[in-house]
Image: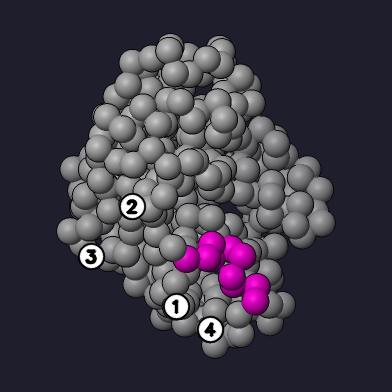
Amino acid sequence: MYFEKEISGWKSWGGVFQDKEAFTPLAMAILTEAGFPSLPLENLSPGTNAVFRSGNVVIKIYVPMESGLDTRPDWLNEQAVMERAARLEVPSPKLLAAGEKQDKYLFRWIIMEFCPGQEAGKALPEMSVPQRTAFARRVRELLNRLNQPADIIPRDLKQQAMENDRFDCLHPQLVSELKARAQSLDLSDSVLVHGDCTGENLLMEDGQPILIDFADCCLAPAWYELPAAVFELFHCDRDAVEAFRGGEDRDVFLRKLLDGLCIHDFGGNILHDFFEREGIAADEISSVRTLEALLRNRLYGREAQT
């Protein structure tokens, strides 16, 4: 047996998924069986799954069923999307191998190339306005290239929104309005979306964006990308958001941003973290109308208020 820790629920996984010592025997066995050198593990930015660098490759070991989460669809989708991203010439890591390892638990895994570069979330604050805006335009171009029809396992985004307890950290009336809005949305024009375009999931090398971590990819309207990009990548920086918006009408962009928040799997967390950064109590924003006014002012300035 290579993995000796106990996994019984989500909390137990959260206590071990960044523990490289706990995962080293399992990772070394997987790497060896897949024909890669068994080099020491290094921690990478935490996410949902156990992700480590080993020399020139990255090994991702998915959450087992015993955590209470079935990641088989994510594992299958991530492989399909990485292969599709390569065909679309989207800068991203190359998928090298994938498989399953029956140990104490059934672990699904992928091995991909390691992409050098700085996390965009750490690089952007140090960049000049022209550098930030140029990067934002490149991110928009990259997502436009990715956001094409695809054959992957679909999700019921409206049902996901109704059952999404990540909204519970917000004002109950706001949550009610967001979920009602989600049910009214037209989701027929769905494409492949990354879904988690944050400062951790975009690397920057020589000013060029590299997209990583496709575990949250799904089929959705292209505006599903907006919440993570606006709030978690650009942190509502007006210059970057304006460049990312391109020539799209401000009101249309803001409507799409609100629509994206309604159905995004992490919409509640994204808003909670935004309020916290802005020094706003989570229960202070009690309606979509108030939220829209706040975002209009934050993104466009007071002169844009109507």
Name the amino acid, label 4: Gln
The location of residue 256, given as percent across then percent down, is 46, 59
Residue occupied by mark 2: 113
Q: CA distance from mark 1 to mark 2?
A: 19 Å
User: In the image, which disc is placed on residue 89?
Assistant: 3
118 in magenta: yes
Residue mark closest to the camera, 2 vs 4: 2
Viewer can see residue 180 = no
The location of residue 70, given as percent across then percent down, is 40, 22
Write down the region rendered in magenta: 117-126
Viewer can see residue 303 = yes
Residue mark closest to the camera, 2 vs 3: 2
Residue at 21 percent across and 50 percent down: it is 83
Quarter of the image for residue 237 reads: bottom right
Residue occupied by mark 4: 131
Residue occupied by mark 1: 206
Task: Sort mark 2 into few (<14), some (14-19) or many (20+) by Cα contacts within 10 Å.
Answer: some
